[in-house]
Image (cartoon, rainbow, N blue to C red):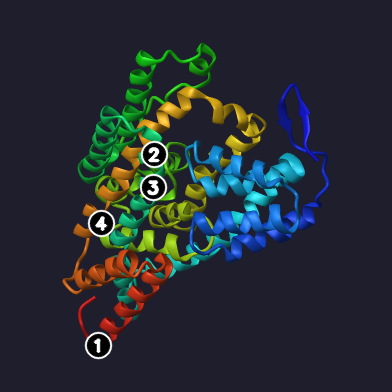
Amino acid sequence: MNGEEGGVAHPPSPQVSLGTIGKEWLRLGCIGFGGPPTHITLLRRLCVEERQWIEAKEFEEAIATTNLLPGPASTQLAIYCAWRVRGAVGAVLGGLCFIVPGLVLILALSAVFLARHPPDWILGAAAGAGAAVPAVALNAAWGFVPASWKRIGTGRSQRIRWIAYGLCGGAAAATVGPYLVLVLVGCGVTEIMIRRQRRPLPPSSARAFIPALVLHGAAVGGLGALAWVALKVGALSYGGGFVIIPLMQHDVVSTYHWMTGAQFLNAVALGQITPGPVVQTVAVVGYAAGGVGGGLLAALIAFTPSFAFVLVGGRHFDQIRANGVVESFLTGAGPAVIGAIAGSAIPLGLSFGHLWQIPVLAGGLVWIFVARRGVVAALLIAGAIGVVVALSGVPV
């Protein structure tokens, strides 16, 4: 099933029908609650264990490679798996089927939660779930620590750099959100330069990777601003879906005033409790900025890079994994991403509008870090507490 030419893997001849891809990837898009770990498990079960379309080793390598790419890794993995079994047409169909169910649901929920005068119980549910979001952000950051700490190396100077990168990312997320991308890129480039001085990298590797030169978009508002925010989410976010929070928060709340801080908390919560990619949060932002059309535009821009990365680079995934410059860049950017995700908990917490949200946050921290229970359950329980609070007459 694996064709090769010159050592580079090519997609196989079409063997899986488009109808099968549409049905199976649509099913994954409907039941994929719980973020990337759930998506990876479902894709492995379908493609490796049940249908045996992809070998286990290749699947694990695809996971590693998609984690090297900017943007939502589990979405790129879903697109890649569809590409492997039916080429470009399969990739587009599979990716859309994986994304669309959650997109439809999150836009419908956006209409409810962002309505001009929603019922008190809706406001309570939103405030309750939003109160647990900083705990979810801290949990997401903590989950990335072991692999990143191992990647940097065991030397004293390497560990010090890891801590420094993390502090830079955390400080940027808490203070200068619009320029966070520059900080992430700066940490990655710094690590490239340090490693290049100590061990020259192959010229071919250097040519294969060109660090992004990112300028902050002019505060022009409107569709141009929305497109810039969505592009950052889809093409410039390193380290998984949750890094979109610090990348978007300042622009959405402070620069363009599309949402209040509390509404942004709601958007993050909706992205967590709906199936499919966590990056769907950007659709809530788009809805706040421009209604259903804005939500669809934001989703289109945010997910297009993922399709492009797989369609253009899928056959070169092995080269991406072996690229020393890419590896060095992510070794530096990774800790900064972790710091940024953790640092985003500060402005998220400062967005609370009611004192009763503080004990809900404390409960969320205990639920996730002490009891070691799930994030989706934490958000749903916090939302239920908010409904009870609202129905009891407490201001929400």
Considering the numbered disc 4 on the image, is that residue within a helix, a strand or a loop? helix
In the image, what residue type sits under mark 1?
Answer: Ser
Callout 3: few (<14), some (14-19), or many (20+) C-alpha neighbours within 10 Å?
A: some
**Where is residue 390 drawn, in percent x and y?**
27, 82
In the image, what residue type sits under mark 3?
Answer: Phe
- For residue 361, which numbered disc appears in the image? none
* Left or right for 375, reference 155: right
Say above or below: 123 vs 249. below
Residue where numbered disc 3 is placed: 144
> Does the rendering let one see residue 122?
no
Residue where numbered disc 2 is placed: 150
- For residue 392, which numbered disc appears in the image? 1
In the image, what residue type sits under mark 4?
Answer: Leu
Q: Earlier in the sequence, mark 2 or mark 1?
A: 2
Q: How many marks?
A: 4
Q: Earlier in the sequence, mark 4 or mark 1?
A: 4
**Where is residue 202 drawn, in percent x and y?**
50, 14
Considering the numbered disc 1 on the image, is that residue within a helix, a strand or a loop? loop
Real-space CA distance between mark 4 and mark 3, rounded to the nearest whole angstrom: 20 Å
Nearer to us: label 4 or label 2: 2
Q: Residue furthest bottom?
A: 392
